[in-house]
Amino acid sequence: MTRQDPARTVPDTAPPAPPGPPPETGPAPAPAGSAPHRASEADALTCRALRYAFGETRAVDGVDLAVRPGEVFGLLGPNGAGKTTAIRCITTLLPVPAGMVHVFGHDAARERMAVRRLLGYVPQQLSADAGLTGRENVALFARVYDVPRRERAARVDQALRAVHLTDAANRLANTYSGGMIRRLELAQALVSAPRLLVLDEPTIGLDPIARTSVWEHINAVRAATGMTVLVTTHYMDEAEQYCDRVALMHRGRIRALGTPAELRSALRARRARTAPSAPGPAPSPLPAHGPATPSPPSATEPTLEDVFRDVAGTGLDEQSGDFRDVRNTRRTAARVG
C-alpha cells in the first residue's frame, strides 16, 4: 500500500489483541493484568489496537494511528468502514478500555472529562437548534463545554466572529443557509477553544461554494491557533487539498496511511509492477519547424479517488452502512441543502 508511518507503529508495551471471539456488545475487553500505558504527549491523538463491536459485528478492528499536533488528518473510507464509530470512541461517546485512545497524553477511558475539555466536535447529524438564534446556540454549547461564566460572552462573540456570523448572530438558525448552519456548528465546537477539532463529514450536502467557505474558516482558525483537526469526508478533492495526511479505512481496519502524494505514488508503483509489458510506441518524427510540443500529463496518473477504490473495491459493498446510516445522511443533507 504505502510505507508505514513511524508514528503508527505499536510499541512493545501496547496491549495485545484480546483472544477469542468478539464481545457481545461494547468495546473489546482489555487484556487481564495489562499495565496502563501513558501515550506520548508529542501526539495530539493516539489509537492503539482500537476495537469496538456491536454484538457480533466488529465495527472497529484493531486501528493503530497517531495524529500529529497542528495537522489536518483525514479519515477516509466507504459507508460502514467504521469511521464514525472510531470518532465516537475518540470523543468518549463510546466507552473503550484504558490504553486504547489518548488525546494529548490523556487516556480517554481513565480521564474522560480531561479529554472532553480538549475536544471540539461537529457530528455528522445536525447539532444546531433551529428554534434558537445563532448566538443562543453557541452560548448553549459554551455551557455544555463548561466555559467559565465570566468568559462565556467573550468566547461566544469570538467564535461567531471566527466563522463570520456576527451579523447573523441574532437571527433564528432556521433562517440560515446550509453553509451558514455548518459554520454555526463550527462556532459551537470552537467556543471551548479546543486543541483537537473533530469533524464528521462537515460539508455533507453543501454546494461547492459553501464547502469551500467552511474549509476556509477551518483553516483560518487552525492557522491562528495551531489547532489539530481530525476530519472524515467522502469528498476526495477535499482530502487531497486540505489534509496533510490521510488514513483509508475499510471494514474496521486502516488499509493505507500517508500523505495524499505518498498514497498516489504507491498506487502508481503497484500499477507499474502489475501492468503487462508491451512494446513502446514508435518515436514521433521531429517537427520541421520549432521545438517539440510537451506531452500532456498521462491520463492514467492515479488520483486519491483511485487509491480509495483500490482499497475499498469498485463494486457495491453489502456491508457499507445500514438503513439508519442512509436515513441520517439523507436527513442531514436535506436540512443543510
Image (cartoon, rainbow, N blue to C red):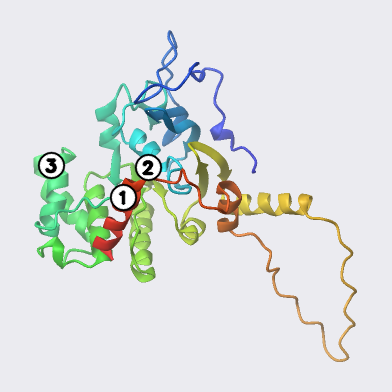
What is the three-letter code of the residue carrying label 1?
Gln
* Vertical arrangement, residue 222 with respect to residue 295, above or below: above
Residue 164 falls left or right of residue 311: left
User: Which element is circle 1 on?
Assistant: loop
Q: Quadrant of residue 157?
A: bottom left
* Vertical arrangement, residue 135 with respect to residue 66, above or below: below
Asked whether the beta carbons under mark 2 and mark 1 sit within 8 Å of each other, the answer is yes
**Residue located 37% across and 60% down the image:** 215
Instruction: Give the CA distance from mark 2 to mark 1.
Output: 9 Å
Tag nearer the camera, 2 or 3: 2
* Vertical arrangement, residue 147 with respect to residue 34, above or below: below
**Residue located 77% across and 82% down the image:** 293
Residue 219 image point, x, y percent: 38, 57
Residue occupied by mark 2: 84
**Residue located 28% across and 34% down the image:** 93
Residue 281 falls left or right of residue 207: right
Residue 203 image point, x, y percent: 35, 59
Quarter of the image with the N terminus in it = top right
Asked whether the beta carbons under mark 2 and mark 3 sit within 8 Å of each other, the answer is no
Looking at the picture, tell me which residue is in the foreground, 301 or 329. Answer: 329
Mark yes or no: residue 97 visible. Answer: yes
Residue occupied by mark 3: 143
User: Which element is circle 3 on?
Assistant: helix
Residue occupied by mark 1: 124
Q: Residues within 10 Å of mark 1 (few under 14, many from 20)?
A: some
Residue 261 image point, x, y percent: 61, 54
What is the three-letter code of the residue carrying label 3?
Arg
**Residue located 41% across and 17% down the image:** 30
Counting residues from the start of the chain, the first of labels 2 and 3 encountered is 2
Asked whether the beta carbons under mark 3 and mark 1 sit within 8 Å of each other, the answer is no
